[in-house]
Amino acid sequence: MTAEVLPPSTLPSLPDDPFGTEVLTDPYEFHERLRAAGPVVSLPRYGLYAMGRFDEVKASLQDWQTFVSSRGAGLADFAKEKPWRPPSLLLEADPPDHTVVRTAMNGVIAPRTIRALRERFAGPAEEIADRLVERGTFDAVTDLAEAYPLQVFPDAVGLPDEGRENLLPYGALAFNAFGPDNELRRTALAQAAPVQAWIWASCQREALAPGGFGAQIWEAADRGEITHEQAPMLVRSLITAGVDTTVYGIGNTMYALASHPDQWAQVHAEPTLAKFAFDEALRWESPVQTFFRTTSRDAEVAGTVIPEGSKVLLFLGSANRDPRHWGEDADRLDIRRRAAGHVAFGMGVHQCVGQPVARMEVELVLTALARRIRRIELAGTPVPKLNNTLKGWASVPLRIEPA
Ligand code: OVM
């Protein structure tokens, strides 16, 4: 048999459904095949291009001129399909429009604001840690990862007390909606109307308590940094991106450490390691697994041309485990490695604006637990929570040994 010489334009292709139950439940075997197949891979099931290697994922996130967000950060191409909700002014926009609203948001989530909030977030973190340690067994998701952010974040935004049960369903909806028209997305959209109505009402000036992030966004409009039409949309961004992400972040961090008791022991011995444990957990099991971009022109990536108007699926969770970047032990959880530089918060102009809030929440709650708990272990089988974008758990039963 003669060896076939492939033309350089021949693109590797994988038949897998990255939004199917198998990959969503356990994506890591698929990620390995994706990275092995090449720097750019075709996913013909959805007519997509995909990248799973660290260098190309990072470079594409940084090249906002070529890999645009204004045509949607999900599978739907806003140039061709009507979005399920009015597009986000932050996530689904490009410079220069994006720059204006991003600058205003940076002002709202400023270091001074975060320092002031730390006091208000610290008490509840200590209290929840006391309660859970007292119990001895608890669920890291429902009793901690959901309970703590929901106790502190809605108050920080200034949201109404009534109706907060809509927050988690809205996050699940928004992150499922990035995916294809599958069961997860359809089910979420079928129940969306009352949830969306509460969210939008809560973004209005009269609904928001003084002093919170929400009121501050409206004040930025009064100062002329943004328009009054833009203000409720930016509050919506905070609500959409600020709840489920931190819930999954805490749940995944606790799962990571509970399944590696030796790593927990290190954080217990030295609770200031909590922030490193969080970065390593984000790298090892990234809550936001994927985002899409759309090519605004023919894009050359590692010798492959991606034609203009293509949807490109960037696998953040795969980039964060790429041995080409992280070394042969990329799959190993090691809180002492230099995990900062992961792309779990994205990279470039769209990199997570709420990052300081998320980091503060996790540091406070993880430090409070690390001081009080000597040993931690899984007390049962964790139950995955499936979502088209988010990777995490519905339940992580834990048993702990107090210090
Ligand atoms: C938004 C937004 C930003 C980041 C993530 C996200 C649903 C949404 O601006 O609405 O996920």
Image (spheres, helix red, strand yellow):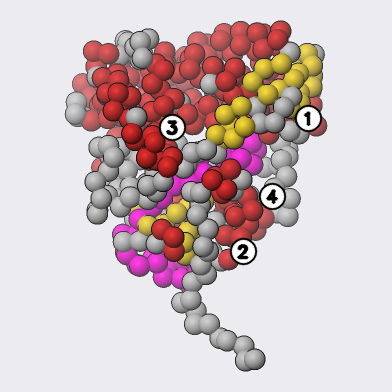
Around disc 4, counting alpha carbons within 10 Å, would you say few (fewer than 14), some (14 to 19), or many (20 or more)?
some
- Nearer the observer, 102 or 289: 289
Mark 3: which secondary structure? Answer: helix
* Mark with earlier residue (3, 2): 2
Q: Amino acid at mark 1?
A: Pro
- Nearer the observer, 19 or 212: 19
User: Residue at the location (27% across, 23% down)?
Assistant: 197
Instruction: Classify 243 as above or below 347.
Output: above
Does 63 sit left or right of 13 as displayed? Answer: left
User: Residue at the location (37% across, 9% down)?
Assistant: 161
Q: Is residue 333 magenta?
A: no
Label 3 belongs to which residue? 172
**Visible residue check, residue 246:** yes
Q: Is residue 306 magenta?
A: yes
Q: Are the residues at dot 3 and dot 2 in contact (C-beta closer than 8 Å)?
A: no
Label 1 belongs to which residue? 261
Kindly report which numbered mark, 4 or 3, lies closer to the viewer in this rendering. Answer: 3
